[in-house]
Image (cartoon, rainbow, N blue to C red):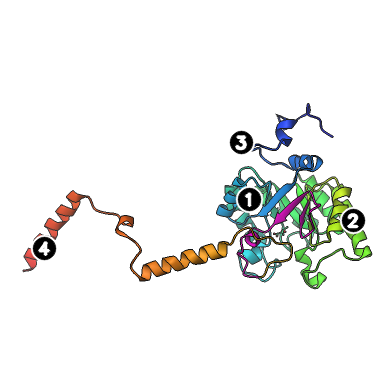
């Protein structure tokens, strides 16, 4: 437990843990800061971002964690699920997000297949996210059975976020996107998963698609911050998908999604207005056009007049 007099990372602890007043310069969010937030019962915020503009908007809105989720397979690339997105595709998006994020902790999802073949392969892929894309942590799905692998990645100086409950990369094993942890045996397994990852030293733990009561028990039990998605309000923080909160998914939202805006309507209206303006000759207006200077225009007139005279 830290006290106000302890110094970390060169700054006084109160500088690191205090909630930054509006208008004050923001601190860089670190894994240690997230732990302090849990201790101080300050909710942690996380949103996905997949490109430069969304990254800038999310970061500038003071969100703590920006996650380049493999959900980009669906939201950005139009795949049916997360399974086919590749390391190279994830790196491409993470690099763009890196350019837009200054303050938030930048976390990238390790996609399906990038850590399933062997530990050496997983380490190589995790290191690519750090070296090539500037991610500050990677996220790996799976509980107890991934604890040793996660320990190895952390030993290679790469912070790892865990992800248990409804893990979309296991969709074929789960037989669909179903709420997990509903029976006593499933709850026991989830607790074992959470404790194993906590002991392995995960930076934080995503709890997806589990009953509120189970998420609350896990949050109470582990030292690492829990970040819920469809896991109720008792987690240490919440994560949602950028496209979900803005109605950009083209699918009905899940129960836990709250829509904070309708970007689809905004974009559709703007695109229709442009289309109508062009076909009705209302765009561009003269004021939206470039013009010659008076002198050049007069000189051009003289040249054209001369040419017309020569043709006569
Ligand atoms: O890929 C993703 O967006 C995620 C979040 C839903 C946690 O993993």
- Ligand 1 is located in which of the four quadrants? bottom right
Residue 275: image quadrant is bottom left
Residue beneath label 3, please? 25
Question: Would you say the beta carbon of the disc 1 residue lies within 8 angstroms of ligand 1?
Answer: no
User: x and y percent of residue 178 in the render?
Assistant: 80, 69
| Residue drawn at the location 26% of the way across and 54% of the way down | 291
Closest to the observer: 233 or 241? 233
Marks 4/1: CA–CA distance = 60 Å
**Viewed as shown, does residue 262 lie left or right of 196?**
left
The region drawn magenta spans 227-251
Residue beneath label 4, please? 307
Residue 16 vs 232, above or below: the answer is above
Q: Which mark is residue 191?
A: 2
N-terminal label among 3 and 4:
3
N-terminal label among 2 and 4:
2
Marks 2/1: CA–CA distance = 35 Å
The C terminus - image quarter: bottom left
Q: Which mark is residue 299?
A: none
User: x and y percent of residue 186 in the render?
Assistant: 90, 64
């Amino acid at each position: 437990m830290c006290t106000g007099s302890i110094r970390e990372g060169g700054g006084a602890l109160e500088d690191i843990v205090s909630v930054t007043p509006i208008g004050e310069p923001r601190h860089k969010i670190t894994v240690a800061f997230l732990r302090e937030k849990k201790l101080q019962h300050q909710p942690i915020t996380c949103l996905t971002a997949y490109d430069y503009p969304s990254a800038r908007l999310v970061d500038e809105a003071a969100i703590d964690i920006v996650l380049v989720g493999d959900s980009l397979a669906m939201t950005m690339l139009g795949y049916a699920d997360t399974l086919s997105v590749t390391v190279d595709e994830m790196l491409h998006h993470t690099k763009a997000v890196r350019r837009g994020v200054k303050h938030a902790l930048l976390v990238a999802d390790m996609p399906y297949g990038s850590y399933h073949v062997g530990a050496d392969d997983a380490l190589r892929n995790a290191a690519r996210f750090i070296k090539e894309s500037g991610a500050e942590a990677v996220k790996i799905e799976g509980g107890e059975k991934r604890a040793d692998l996660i320990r190895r990645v952390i030993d290679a100086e790469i912070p790892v976020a865990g992800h248990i409950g409804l893990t979309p990369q296991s969709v074929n094993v789960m037989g669909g996107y179903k709420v997990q942890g509903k029976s006593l045996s499933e709850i026991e397994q989830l607790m074992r998963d959470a404790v194993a990852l906590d002991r392995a030293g995960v930076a934080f733990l995503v709890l997806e698609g589990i009953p509120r009561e189970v998420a609350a028990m896990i949050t109470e039990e582990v030292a690492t911050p829990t970040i819920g998605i469809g896991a109720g309000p008792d987690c240490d923080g919440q994560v949602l998908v950028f496209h979900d909160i803005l109605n950009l998914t083209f699918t009905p939202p899940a129960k836990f999604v709250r829509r904070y805006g309708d970007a689809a309507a905004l974009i559709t209206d703007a695109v229709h207005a442009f289309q109508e303006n062009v076909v009705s000759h209302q765009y561009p207006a003269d004021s939206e056009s470039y013009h010659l200077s008076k002198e050049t225009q007069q000189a051009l007139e003289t040249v054209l007049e001369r040419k017309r005279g020569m043709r006569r």
